[in-house]
Image (tube, helix red, strand yellow):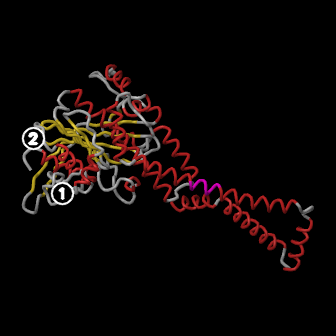
């Protein structure tokens, strides 16, 4: 493909950090140089009232507090760290042809949401001495999105991040709960300013979004997809202004154009404002994974899980976030790409049907016991029952202590059976928790 020069860019990867213990993990990260972000500040760390007023004018209160302002009182934390190490990768075209890429980690951000899965992101940049074009971007995106890409230290990319960025917090492995929901790659967020406006910009957008070889969407490679598939993905494209277009997909958000990063306020919009919209949607997606997994593994009762889920939705399931159309458009189409509405609808149906079934079964069992109690209450006296027990004891000709012990064990087993009959799921959960200890 022809050489296409890049003038400015933003590259970020987003990963799942898992649950964050605010008593233990918070101190570890602060001790390692992370600082808490309480909102826009000026050079003296005093609040930047101009930027704060912009956020008030731009975003609804619930969203702006969670993602931009101080929300630590409700357990939401944003931690940041700069002055991070450089990492090197080798990109192999074949066994004899390869390129070394030296990548600077500009900053690390951690988003902590109380009682829910947390998110981290890394901002990446090519080394200043490297001459870059769109082919380099395509190569680098295919490297940094994969957990298992190998660094020059011989470490897999996810392990390198754990060791050098996340205070040895593991991202993968059988003991890492969050690995159940993270898939096999990081989410990509990329914004690129081209020096010239190519004719087939939408096709380039598709190739970068899917990390396909450049030229794939236009039918110029052996891996070129069917045009129908290309068009189906491009239907979710965000195309508001003539100088840029963006495409949210399941694993990426990509924007290419000209001069959308030219001025500082434009760069800040894409680097922080719009990026945090995407982070919020990814956070919501990962937690849907969590709830779906919990219901399929029968970790706790569907009724209790449903109540927790409704609390989660009440706070985080926002229909709109902004007074501005563009922010809402990014929010909506990012949600479409992540298939949030369909997964949310499916989960609600499953959990509501399960809780309804459990309630019906519980009611049926209660009715049976009530009938049994009714029958017992019709007995005018316990005398006949006591006489029967005494006669049975006399028939067995057992000593009192043996017979009374056996009778006690029988009553305990009968009571346990009744409790299990009424509350089987709760007893199973208690048994599972006992085995996990």
Question: Was residue 205 drawn as part of the magenta stretch in this picture?
Answer: no
Q: Residue furthest front?
A: 228
Q: Residue at x 28, y 50 (%)?
A: 232
Q: Secondary structure at mark 2?
A: loop
Q: Secondary structure at mark 1?
A: loop
Residue 402, image x and y in percent?
Answer: 79, 74
User: Which residue is labeled 2 in the image?
Assistant: 5
Say the numbered circle drawn on residue 128: none
Question: Was residue 357 drawn as part of the magenta stretch in this picture?
Answer: yes
Cα separation between marks 1 and 2: 23 Å
Viewed as shown, does residue 91 lie left or right of 247? left
Compared to residue 93, the image places residue 307 above or below, namely above
Rendered image quadrant of residue 33: top left
User: Which residue is labeled 1 in the image?
Assistant: 224
Rendered image quadrant of residue 183: bottom left
Q: Which residues are magenta?
A: 353-359
* Magenta region, main secondary structure: helix
């Amino acid at each position: 493909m022809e050489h296409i020069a890049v003038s400015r860019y933003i590259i970020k990867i987003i990963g799942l950090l898992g649950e964050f213990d605010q008593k233990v993990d918070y101190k570890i990260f602060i001790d390692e140089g992370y600082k808490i972000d309480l909102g826009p500040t000026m050079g003296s760390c005093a609040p930047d009232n101009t930027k704060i007023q912009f956020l008030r004018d731009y975003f609804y209160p619930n969203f702006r507090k969670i993602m931009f302002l101080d929300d630590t009182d409700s357990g939401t934390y944003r931690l940041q760290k700069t002055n991070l190490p450089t990492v090197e990768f080798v990109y192999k075209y074949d066994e004899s042809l390869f390129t070394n890429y030296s990548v600077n980690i500009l900053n690390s951000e951690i988003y902590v949401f109380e009682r829910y899965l947390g998110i981290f992101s890394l901002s990446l940049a090519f080394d200043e001495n490297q001459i870059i074009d769109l082919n380099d971007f395509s190569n680098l995106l295919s490297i940094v999105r994969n957990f298992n890409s190998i660094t020059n230290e011989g470490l897999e990319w996810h392990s390198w991040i754990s060791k050098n960025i996340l205070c040895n917090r593991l991202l993968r492995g059988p003991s890492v709960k969050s690995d159940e929901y993270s898939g096999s790659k990081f989410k990509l967020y990329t914004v690129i300013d081209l020096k010239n406006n190519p004719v087939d910009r939408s096709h380039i957008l598709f190739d970068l979004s899917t990390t396909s070889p450049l030229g794939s969407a236009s039918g110029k490679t052996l891996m070129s997809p069917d045009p129908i598939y290309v068009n189906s993905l491009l239907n979710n494209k965000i195309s508001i202004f003539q100088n840029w277009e963006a495409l949210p997909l399941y694993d990426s958000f990509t924007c290419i154009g000209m001069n959308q990063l030219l001025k500082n306020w434009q760069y800040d919009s894409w680097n922080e404002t719009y990026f945090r919209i995407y982070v919020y949607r990814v956070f919501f997606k990962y937690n849907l994974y969590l709830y779906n997994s919990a219901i399929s593994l029968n970790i706790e009762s569907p009724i209790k899980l449903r109540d927790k889920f409704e609390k989660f939705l009440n706070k985080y399931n926002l229909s709109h976030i902004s007074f501005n159309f563009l922010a809402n458009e990014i929010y909506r189409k990012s949600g479409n790409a992540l298939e949030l509405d369909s997964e949310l609808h499916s989960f609600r149906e499953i959990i509501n049907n399960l809780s309804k079934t459990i309630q019906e079964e519980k009611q049926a069992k209660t009715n049976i016991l009530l009938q049994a109690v009714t029958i017992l209450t019709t007995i005018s006296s316990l005398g006949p029952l006591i006489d029967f027990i005494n006669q049975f004891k006399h028939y067995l000709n057992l000593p009192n202590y043996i017979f009374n012990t056996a009778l006690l064990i029988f009553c305990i087993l009968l009571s346990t059976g009744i409790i299990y009959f009424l509350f089987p799921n709760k007893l199973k959960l208690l048994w599972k928790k006992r085995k996990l200890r």
